[in-house]
């Protein structure tokens, strides 16, 4: 077997770990079930329009981690794209995340920053009194403590219920913690100092990351397949170090039960206009609208305005649902029952010989792209130090 390390999964975490190990002199085999590297963060040209689409939903790169930023810039240059999101609520469009513009539009007012902050503090006060000094335990507690009940009901509750397919009171507070609240007119979705999209697309980024003479990527292979093969876990378990970034419950054959995962379905459409909705992402906050958002991909690359067609565009309407057997899992849900089951799987994981679990799926943890790359640093570290 011509490998020193087996990496399972060619997403950002697995590829980062593989690259670091290869640069340290290890021969690394990466096994990936899909036909391409990069996991869900994959983009490619739409055949009909030439517009770059994100095949598995919108992926935006942003980070405050200087090590991550330096690392990815070894493999691609980035555009200066700064993400902005809008949301439709009761037939009216508002800017997100919640900012002074959202507050003034919603309350039909012209509050100053101090006045808006005082209003939200007043509306959040009943929740803060109920918490009595303890940290919020759920998404709804955290959200209401941040923005008060009226804004929560308008913009968060219905969207969250659709997105996660779980009552917000059962979701961990961490789900909402990444969303800023601003008392100015800054409509950027992220605060990070480094933001942008790979100039040549995500496909080129991940292929460049995997392009090393000591990295051997095997696509369309399932390391958990029962029919054997040199790089299935049945063949290498205990014989070769394994960095596993697939779903942790699948690794163990779901023997303790299935963790809660969310998957996505997309309705792809071509439109004979140069601009369908005027922005990259339009959320739909109301529960009676069955989808969560519509993505219009041409807006991710305004620098290509003269390259993309002026009379055609492509959109993806995103529907969220609970993942079933055979579905591609996207996001961990993390209800209290999930967290209890995860702890039991983690006890099994520490007993696995020469296996390290990492990444969004292997750790059952929501990770932005930069955090997934940082997780790759951490996943490779034990073997780099050993």
Image (spheres, rainbow, N blue to C red):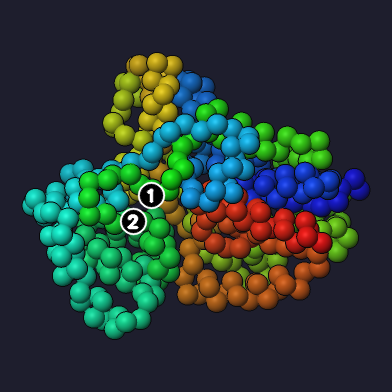
Mark 1 or mark 2, which has the lower sequence index?
Answer: 2
State which mark lies toward you, 1 or 2: 1
Q: Residue furthest left?
A: 109
Secondary structure under badge 1? loop
Q: Is residue 323 visible?
A: no
Q: Which residue is mark 2?
A: 180
Secondary structure under badge 2? loop
Which is more toward the observer, 115 or 244?
115
Which is more toward the observer, 250 or 372?
372
Q: Position of residue 384 (x, y in %)?
A: 77, 56
- Residue occupying image coordinates x 62% and y 43%: 71
The disc label shown at residue 191, or none: 1
Classify residue 384 as left or right of residue 259: right
- Residue occupying image coordinates x 82% and y 40%: 214
Q: Quadrant of the C terminus?
A: bottom right
Which is more toward the observer, 11 or 90?
11
Figure quadrant of residue 175: bottom left
Q: Is residue 121 visible?
A: yes
Q: Are marks 1 and 2 in contact (CB under 8 Å)?
A: yes
Q: Position of residue 277 (x, y in %)?
A: 29, 32
* Alpha carbons under labels 1 and 2: distance apart: 8 Å
- Residue occupying image coordinates x 77% and y 69%: 352
* Circle 1 Cα neighbour tier, 10 Å, few/some/many (<14 / 14–19 / ≥20): some
Classify residue 185 as left or right of residue 76: left
Classify residue 341 as left or right of residue 60: right
Figure quadrant of residue 121: bottom left
């Amino acid at each position: 077997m011509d490998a020193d390390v087996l990496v399972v999964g060619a997403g950002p975490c697995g590829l980062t770990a593989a690259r670091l190990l290869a640069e340290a002199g290890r021969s690394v085999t990466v096994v990936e079930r899909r036909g391409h590297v990069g996991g869900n963060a994959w983009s490619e040209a739409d055949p009909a329009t030439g517009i770059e689409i994100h095949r598995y939903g919108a992926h935006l790169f942003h980070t405050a981690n200087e090590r991550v930023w330096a690392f990815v810039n070894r493999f691609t240059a980035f555009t200066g794209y700064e993400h902005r999101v809008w949301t439709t609520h009761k037939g009216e469009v508002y800017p997100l995340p919640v900012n002074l513009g959202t507050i003034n539009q919603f309350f039909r007012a012209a509050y100053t920053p101090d006045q808006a902050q005082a209003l939200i503090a007043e509306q959040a006060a009943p929740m803060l009194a109920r918490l009595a000094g303890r940290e919020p335990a759920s998404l709804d507690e955290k959200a209401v403590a941040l923005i008060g009940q009226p804004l929560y009901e308008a913009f968060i509750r219905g969207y969250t219920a659709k997105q996660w397919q779980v009552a917000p009171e059962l979701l961990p507070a961490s789900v909402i913690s990444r969303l800023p609240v601003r008392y100015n007119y800054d409509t950027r979705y992220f605060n990070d100092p480094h933001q942008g999209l790979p100039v040549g697309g995500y496909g080129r980024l991940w292929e460049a990351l995997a392009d090393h003479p000591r990295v051997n990527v095997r696509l369309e292979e399932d390391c958990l397949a029962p029919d054997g093969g040199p790089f299935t876990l049945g063949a290498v378990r205990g014989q070769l170090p394994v960095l596993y970034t697939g779903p942790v419950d699948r690794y163990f054959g779901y023997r303790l039960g299935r963790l809660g995962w969310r998957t996505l379905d997309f309705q792809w459409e071509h439109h004979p206009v140069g601009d369908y909705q005027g922005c990259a992402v339009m959320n739909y906050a109301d529960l009676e609208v069955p989808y969560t958002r519509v993505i219009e991909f041409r807006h991710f690359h305004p620098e290509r305005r003269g390259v993309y067609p002026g009379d055609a565009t492509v959109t993806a309407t995103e529907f969220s649902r609970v993942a079933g057997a055979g579905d591609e899992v996207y996001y961990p849900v993390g209800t209290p029952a999930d967290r209890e089951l995860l702890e039991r799987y983690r006890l099994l994981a520490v007993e696995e010989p020469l296996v390290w679990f990492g990444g969004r799926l292997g750790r059952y943890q929501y990770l932005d792209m930069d955090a997934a790359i940082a997780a790759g640093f951490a996943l490779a570290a034990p073997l780099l130090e050993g």
